[in-house]
Structures are given as C-alpha cells and as structure tokens.
Image (tube, rainbow, N blue to C red):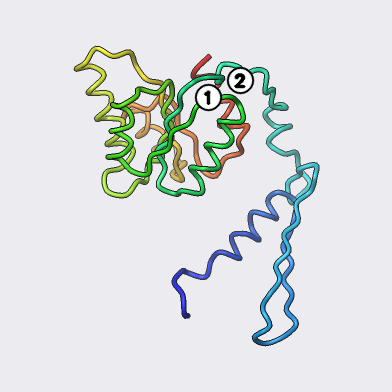
Amino acid sequence: RASGGLGLGLSIVKHLAELHGGGVELSSPGLDAGTTARVWLPLQPTMADGSPTLDSQFGAFDDAALAGLSGRRVLVVEDDRDAAEMLGHILEDRGAQVRIAGDHDSGLAALQARRPDLLLSDIGLPGKDGYALIRQWRTLEVQQGLPRLPAIALTAFGRPDDRAMALDAGFDMHVAKPFAPQVLLKEIQRLVA
C-alpha cells in the first residue's frame, strides 16, 4: 500500500449509502485505468429496508422552530475538520454565528475570548478530551460567577454509560454520532428554547 489508511473508506461509504436507501457502484475499464465510483441516494429518504426515515420517526423538522438560533454564537469543538465544517454549515444555514476549534486548548481559549451562547463538543479530542474541556469550563463559570453555558456532547460513544459520563462531566445533553441533522437541531432547540 503506497498511502496510509486502513482500507475501510469504501466499505464505510457503501454502508452509509445503503443506510440511506441508496447504493454504490464501481467500474473500471481495466488495469491502471482508474476507477469510477458512483454513489446514489434517493430524493425521498428511506432506510435500506424501506422503513421510515428519521424525519418520519421524529416528525418533519420545522426550520421556523429554530428561529432561536438566529444570531446566536455557537462554538463547535471538533478535531475532524470536515465534520466541524459540515456542522458549521448546518448551524449557519439556520442563522447561527459559528466558531470552530479543533482541540481542548483552542476550545477553552475560544470560550474565554468570546463566550458563546452554545457549546457543541466532541468527546474524543486529541490530548485532553471533551470531558476535560467541559469540567474546566464549568469550574471557571463558578469561579467567575458566569451563567451556565448550554453544552452538548457529540460523540461516537453512544452507550447509556457514555451518556451518563457526559452529563456527569457537565454537558447538558449527549448526542451520539452519527446523527441526522434533524436530531441534533431538535436537541439544540430543546436546550436553548
């Protein structure tokens, strides 16, 4: 293998496409001629087995209900740049002012420099994790007499114990990855409403 990686990318893409009711097709004219990958997704989302999507499970998402995000400052602490930018676009499309930090230290600095209205933080950060970030911030809030900042943990760790750990550390909510944007936005709405 000339480049790094685990060779899991295509199987993950296939799995995600199928979860959304789509698929992946690969073709190649021959050796050393490259490969074409086609990913297709349905316009009306359905699960691979035809079951209802998250929209129908959680109710259609009402953007008007998120008017509370308009003008709000949101800090996203996420070490995966692509995930952070995607999340930033979702929030900005609903009127939020988003700032992104890639690790504990830059997240804490951003919190201190310009206190946001909402914190969304990954747990698995390089160096000190998201638990350390929220614990340190909650301590500073108490020491400085600041109002409690609404905070949501975003994590691939989705077991009930993981949720309890996030809440015990000081997060107000726990959202397991991967998540549909509607699910996160509904949690944000509940927290900041």
Q: Is residue 10 above or below residue 80?
A: below
How far across and how far down the image is residue 40, in percent? 75, 56
Give the amino acid at mark 2: Leu
Q: Is mark 1 in CB contact (under 8 Å) with mark 2?
A: yes
Q: Which residue lies at the image location 33% right of the left edge and 43% below the top edge? A: 103
Q: Provide the secondary structure element on which disc 1 rests.
A: helix
Residue 35 vs residue 7: left or right? right
Residue 95 vs residue 132: left or right? right
Q: Is residue 102 above or below residue 16?
A: above
Q: Which residue lies at the image location 44% right of the left edge and 71% below the top edge? A: 4
Q: Residue furthest left?
A: 143
Spatial CA span between label 1 and label 2: 9 Å
Q: Is residue 8 above or below residue 111?
A: below
Query: Disc number at residue 172?
Result: none
In the figure, residue 134 lies in which quadrant? top left
User: Pointer 2: what residue?
Assistant: 66
User: Pointer 1: what residue?
Assistant: 188
Classify 10 Å Cα crowding around label 1: few (below 14), some (14-19), many (20 and above). Answer: many
How far across and how far down the image is residue 25, in percent? 74, 67
How far across and how far down the image is residue 95, in percent? 58, 24
Give the amino acid at mark 1: Ile
Classify 10 Å Cα crowding around label 2: few (below 14), some (14-19), many (20 and above). Answer: many
Residue 20 vs residue 158: left or right? right
Task: Say whether disc 1 or disc 2 marks the residue closer to the N-terminus.
Answer: 2
In the figure, residue 28 lies in which quadrant? bottom right
Q: Provide the secondary structure element on which disc 2 rests.
A: helix
Q: Which residue lies at the image location 57% right of the left edge and 37% below the top edge? A: 89
